[in-house]
Amino acid sequence: MSDTYIIIGAGLGGLFLGKLLNRKKMDVTILEQGSQPGGALQTFVREGIRFDTGFHSVGGMQPGGPLRKIMEPFGLNYLPWEKMGEDECIDGGPFMRCSSNTPFEMEHVVKPYENSTWRLKGGGKTLVDALVKTQDIRLNKKVVSIENKEIICADGSTFRADYIISAIHPRLTFELVKDHVRSSYLKRLAKLEDGPGAVTLNCKLKEGMLKWINHEIFLQDKVMIHFGERDADGYARSLDLLGFAPITADELIEAATKHIPDFRYALDKYWMSTPETWQRYTGTPGGTAFGIKKYTSADFLPPQTPIPWLYLTGQNTGLHGVLGTCISALNTFKALVPGE
Ligand SMILES: Cc1cc2nc3c(=O)[nH]c(=O)nc-3n(C[C@H](O)[C@H](O)[C@H](O)COP(=O)(O)OP(=O)(O)OC[C@H]3O[C@@H](n4cnc5c(N)ncnc54)[C@H](O)[C@@H]3O)c2cc1C
């Protein structure tokens, strides 16, 4: 009988690792607390407009680029990726304030955007729909306890596997673990610092007021402006603003208006998410957008833990973003299946 695997969390990290294990015909079950898979890749629809909650664009999808190479074995490179125009960075790059610019992080998170930026038609949902295909994903399964290879969920259901891989925040993971864990490891986890919480405004725009722009705008490292849906005449129907706590809705709107004066008049209404929303929705402590900060190599947690059957994956163990999280899943896969 082959080994069995349970992954906790159906965000990108869990879904992509599941895909890697599935390709090797492994027996994998993914447990997700929410009623939808995707984590920070989820989309929602309000008043007929689709909004992305987290992910908006990626780097590294150019022919031969690192993300394209990762996507190719799964045919994910054939999804409707669209190349965008050159990013507009006003007074600095997008990631400088919220990540730590270790050479590894610069190489894999920031630099891929320097070549080109890509959006995905249909947003994060398009990627999630492709990733969930043929996977065994159990929704509404919030894991509340892990002990001796057994998982207990909030609804009382239990699961057992030879290997358990947590794709949620490592500190949360070890709050759930009832087995003995050496204190030096727990102390190391406690010292890791989380990046700032995300504040987003998903904005519905009045018809025919603001021309749709096909590039990302990063304002002084603090606010990112993502254009969303467009109408047949080339006007934007929606626009998303992302900032980092502490920042208010008014401050986000003011920052965007300074760069796009017509934005304030074009704004019809918005839906806001705060770090508390993110904490509720993905469980991420403090609603951090990009997980644990990586100052030095000591902040990169290996997939292995002191418990031989428990592994980690997701943006907190390696790098954040679609590319970074996929690389983390690949690292966990290599640790689980030596020789791959
Ligand atoms: C606002 C925002 C904007 C972003 N924009 C971009 C972008 O434009 N480009 C880019 O490349 N990246 C972007 N990112 C980063 C990218 O989305 C993340 O790095 C990546 O999606 C993280 O995936 P993950 O699987 O590690 O974590 P998550 O997406 O957080 O997934 C964790 C999953 O675990 C589940 N879970 C938590 N606790 C439990 C439990 N106890 N039991 C069961 N399930 C549980 C959660 O519900 C969630 O589904 C953005 C992130 C945010 C927040």
Image: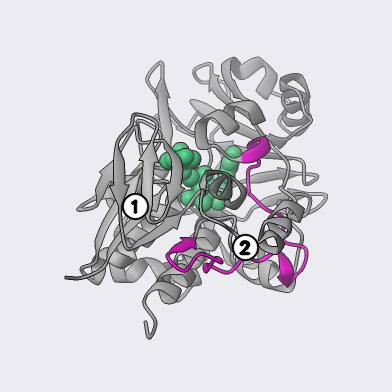
**Real-space Cα separation, disc 2 to disc 1, in angstroms:** 22 Å
* Residue 260 image position (x, y, % from top left): 71, 31
Q: Is residue 300 magenta?
A: yes
- Which of pointers 2 and 1 indicates the residue nearer the eye? 2
Residue at 24% in and 52% down:
135
Q: Is residue 169 left or right of residue 221?
A: left
* Residue 294 image position (x, y, % from top left): 72, 61
Mark 1 secondary-structure assignment: loop
Whether residue 154 is situated above or below residue 85 in the rendered picture: above
| Quadrant housing residue 182 | bottom right
Q: Is residue 307 magenta?
A: yes
| Quadrant housing residue 199 | top right
**Residue 327, which numbered label?**
none
Whether residue 43 is situated above or below residue 320 in the rendered picture: above
Magenta stretch: helix, strand or loop mostly: loop
Residue at 71% in and 48% down:
194
Which amino acid type is shown beneath numbered disc 2?
Val
**Residue 80, which numbered label?**
1
Observer able to see residue 81:
no
Mark 2 secondary-structure assignment: helix
Q: Is residue 46 left or right of residue 323?
A: left
Q: Magenta stretch?
A: 285-312
* Residue 248 image position (x, y, % from top left): 75, 23
Residue at 42% in and 43% down:
124
Ligand 1 within 8 Å of disc 1? The answer is no
Q: Earlier in the sequence, mark 2 or mark 1?
A: 1
Nearer to me, 208 or 192 = 192
Nearer to me, 178 or 66 = 178
Which amino acid type is shown beneath numbered disc 1?
Pro
Q: Could you tell me which quadrant the N terminus lies in?
A: bottom left
**Which residue is denoted by mark 2 in the rendering?**
109
Q: Hey, which residue is sitting farthest front in the picture?
A: 180
